[in-house]
Amino acid sequence: MKLWPLFSFCVIILFGCSSPKKPSIEDLNTPFELKENYSATYEESIEYYKKLQDFFPKNISIEEAGESDAGKPIYKVVLAEKLTSPKTKKDGSDKLVMLINNAIHAGEPCGVDASMMLARDILMDDEKRKLLEEITLVIIPIYNVGGALRRNSTTRANQNGPAEYGFRGNAQNLDLNRDFIKMDSKNARTFVRLFSDWMPDIFVDTHTSNGADYQYTLTLLPTFHEKLPKPLDDFLRLKMLPSLYKQVDEAGWLVCPYVMSYGTPDKGILGFYDSPRYSSGYASLFNCLSFTTEAHMLKPFADRVNSTYTFLDELLKFSFENKSEIKKAKAESEELLANQQEFVLDWELDFSRFDSIPFKGYEAKYKTSEITGKQRLYYDREAPFEKKIAYFNYYSPTVKVTKPKAYIIPQGLRRVVNRMKDNNVQFSQLKKDSLIDVELYEVLSFETAKKPYEGHIPHSKVEVKSSKVKKQFYAGDYLVLTNQSNVRYILETLDPQAKDAFFVWNFFDSFMQRKEYFSGYVFEDYAAQFLRENPAFQKEFEEKKDADTSFANSASKQLMFIYENSPLAEGTNNVYPIGRILN
Ligand SMILES: [Zn+2]
């Protein structure tokens, strides 16, 4: 008999089956707690969660979530009551899922350190661990891996610590907090897959603010509430936010809505329209209650970490206590969405409506600049004030569409199809070539940015005209029914008029260009004949010449006008290729 199997059996008895002994809190100090003004590196954060996993293997796991552009993986940490069940939300668990994303801007790392302490405290404190009875917590320790690796002490020019931090751009120099729809980065692909696996009920993205100075350590950017279906909008605005502001305040940190203003905050602050390019705007497409925390850049790093910690902790407590109400608001919202026919695709701030909120600021004053000799702004910390200011937190719809029954996407549009698949959109594919009645958009006009923005030259102000036609589709083309739970993602990416549609991000530019042309000297004779044979069109042509001098003076414009209206025109120039099926 060989001795080895018996020996390994004994080893398992001795070591493998015993639970690890409970560590002391000193064993589990985070790098932030051990060093002054310090934020954990990418490697340290992974190492720390692995250490927690060694001590508490039943309640915490750390695994690779997927690739980043930097070549090193993005990790995900899961804290659960029992780790065996919730690999994803698809296991049928009725627990709430809360997702925390850290260091999307790697120079703003408060959440990295706050999340490490929070995970530890949940595992160490019997009272806190009860949160896991109702909530599964998923943490992305560091999302912008490339940015985190570019550690430095200078690129956050105005920020008060930590001593070292990462960079805003990722390994492709993309701002990942603009990438959730266009998905140019591997990071976004990893996030979207993780998000659609877990379908969180609550989402937080942690940041550090730029901008004005005021007394608050933490500001909070909740997703722009009107985009949510009414039950979730009401719950967020009337119950969740007032409770969270109060709880965080009572826990010792001054917190107010995110401060975006025209000049200085005493003139009023503006609600932020987090369209789906942003993490919170993306998350809210899926009825997720989503938040961006913005700790204030001029407050000491330790205060920023601790106030971010407090917010996350209070959010967990609130969600634990209000689980059934959150579930109810979400279920009602989903039912409402399933029956909703009209969807808003873009919004503008409504300056006629505002709330009056208390604000603790520092007086904005002006003095002569030593540099320019001109007047310069400063905030006088010796002159704190508290007064009511206007909070412009209401938007009005600017684009509305009626939901089609389905979209049909030609299979060649791979960038579109791949992103839909990553987002768990359900498809079927045509079994045979078919001529299908669809509504098609002709894109009449749009504006284009003058400079590159996040790797694109985005379009805006897209105007379309729709017409009903029969269009040839082929076996393998994708049919996307809109009666699915991610209907808002489908509409807000596929309708070119939406604020962050794929069209906006240049996915359809090849369709916005003529492919065939004609030589005027050959076309002249055809054009003359065409006018003679079509007297109604000839009348229209003559009227246009009379009304439009530049047209009357341009031979090429006149020939192009006739060409476009003749049977020779290619017919697909400026036509958006995805069909809307109405019946
Ligand atoms: Zn940020």
Image (tube, helix red, strand yellow):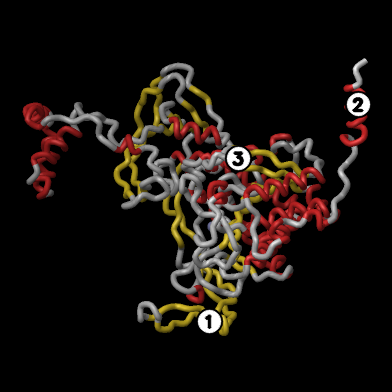
Spatial CA span between label 1 and label 2? 73 Å
State the image coordinates of residue 92 (x, y, percent, origin top left): 73, 36
Query: Is there CB contact under 8 Å for labels 1 and 2?
Result: no
- Say what amino acid the circle numbered 2 marks: Phe
Nearer the camera: disc 1 or disc 2: 2
Q: Viewer-proximal residue, 317 or 441?
A: 317
Q: Secondary structure beneath disc 2?
A: helix
Neighbourhood count class around disc 3 (C-alpha, 10 Å): few under 14, some 14–19, many 20 upward: many
Residue located 46% across and 30% down the image = 583
- Say what amino acid the circle numbered 1 marks: Asp
Is residue 106 shown to the viewer in this render? yes
Spatial CA span between label 1 and label 3? 45 Å
Q: Earlier in the sequence, mark 1 or mark 2?
A: 2
Q: Is residue 169 left or right of residue 66?
A: left
Q: Which residue is mark 3?
A: 73
Q: Quadrant of ligand 1?
A: bottom right
Nearer the camera: disc 3 or disc 2: 2
Spatial CA span between label 3 and label 2? 37 Å
* Label 1 near ligand 1 (CB < 8 Å): no
Nearer the camera: disc 1 or disc 3: 3
Q: Viewer-proximal residue, 312 or 247?
A: 312
Quarter assignment of residue 197: top right
Q: Is residue 394 left or right of residue 114?
A: left
Residue located 57% across and 61% down the image = 208
Q: Secondary structure beneath disc 3?
A: loop
State the image coordinates of residue 104 (x, y, percent, origin top left): 56, 51
Q: Is residue 261 above or below residue 340?
A: below
Q: Quadrant of the N terminus?
A: top right
Q: Viewer-proximal residue, 573 or 104?
A: 104
- Say what amino acid the circle numbered 3 marks: Pro
